[in-house]
Amino acid sequence: MRAAAPLGAKGRALARLLRLIPILLSGPIARRDLLFRLESVLVEEGEEGILPAIGASEDSTSTVNRDIRLLRELDLLDLGDGRVYDARPGANLPVWLTPVEAQALDLARSILDQIGVPESESLATISGRVPTLTRREPQMATPLLPPSTSTVAPAVWQAVHEALRRGRQMTIVYRPPDADQAHAARIDRAALMWIGGAFYLVGFRPDRQAQYPEIAPFLHLREYRLDRICQVTVAEETVLLGELPLLRSRFVVDAAIRGRLSTLRDPEGLVVQSVEPLACGNLRVEALDTGLVRARQRILSFGEHLVRVEDPPMLIALLRECSAKLAVAISK
């Protein structure tokens, strides 16, 4: 235990307030429990001299009462009435972030706002509590994204998130593009993905697996654009797959791409693209995609910088077929 540094009256008051605020915000707490919690924290941190021992005198209660009154007067916390404190952040309670963290928060809020995610309002509230002096001038322009959820039915959005959060299977009613009628599909493991400027529900179809058990699991994945889903029913059955069976591809691009590729993760932290520098200067890329079409699009986007495709064989064969058809088309 480190020795407590000598503090004056103002220093001791500030030290108590800095420890009181998180305790009060952690949940409803009675006044006596608050006193014991505060003393435990101070003793653990070697600051027992900041607050007299509980029961040793009446100073502890009166001191904390003054601290509570000060928090109210400064509007740092909304503590309500009564002897049980159920604190909420007050209008003047700041959120302290480093300048880099404040910039990241603003960027996240802007992106969520553009794609119509309701959590952007929560980030806006947090951002509004960051002191102005903490902020730096923007280092880059805020990315502009096309809106993607403005035409999604709120009930669909909520049901999809409920199924994903609870780990439940779901049945969707989906209307494909240029189709007159919608059809129902049962989905096991699923994820929301941002693909080509729109939100898609990527789901595993157990009925397809039952019909074609011999083919690769990723071929049972289907993409459903969120604004074309008419209805979602959350099932009681839990999902059977531990993760989506995404297609893993491996290919090499030349050194001219160095510095323009990096490791990418999805919102859940899964690495969807990893980059390995090779001794010759080229880069080996491993990527996860929802199927052959998306993997082909990713790889062909590198154009003349593509050196070779190493895996899987099914994708290599598809790319050779595409190249042959393109060569024939050009010759005509």
Image: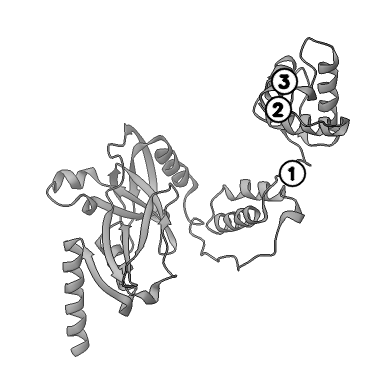
Three-letter code, disc 2 = Leu
Mark 2 or mark 1: whose residue is earlier in sequence: 2
> Horizontal placement of 292 versus 267: left or right?
left
> Horizontal placement of 14 versus 1: left or right?
right
Three-letter code, disc 1 = Pro
Residue 332 visible, this orientation = no
Q: Which residue is mark 2?
A: 24
Asked if labels 3 and 1 touch by Cβ distance under 8 angstroms, the answer is: no
Mark 2 or mark 3: whose residue is earlier in sequence: 2
Please report the residue visible at 14 percent of the width from the left and 46 percent of the height from the top. 211
Three-letter code, disc 3 = Glu
**151 in relation to 326, above or below:** above
Q: Which residue is mark 3?
A: 39
> Where does residue 32 sit, x and y in percent of width and height?
73, 14
Quadrant location of residue 248? bottom left
Helix, strand or loop status at disc 2? helix
Q: Residue furthest top?
A: 55
Residue 21 visible, this orientation = yes
Number of numbered labels in the structure image: 3
How far apart, in angstroms, are the residues tagged by discs 2 and 3? 14 Å
Quadrant location of residue 88? top right
Please report the residue visible at 32 percent of the width from the left and 63 percent of the height from the top. 285
Q: Residue furthest front?
A: 3
Q: Which residue is mark 1?
A: 94
**258 in relation to 21, above or below:** below
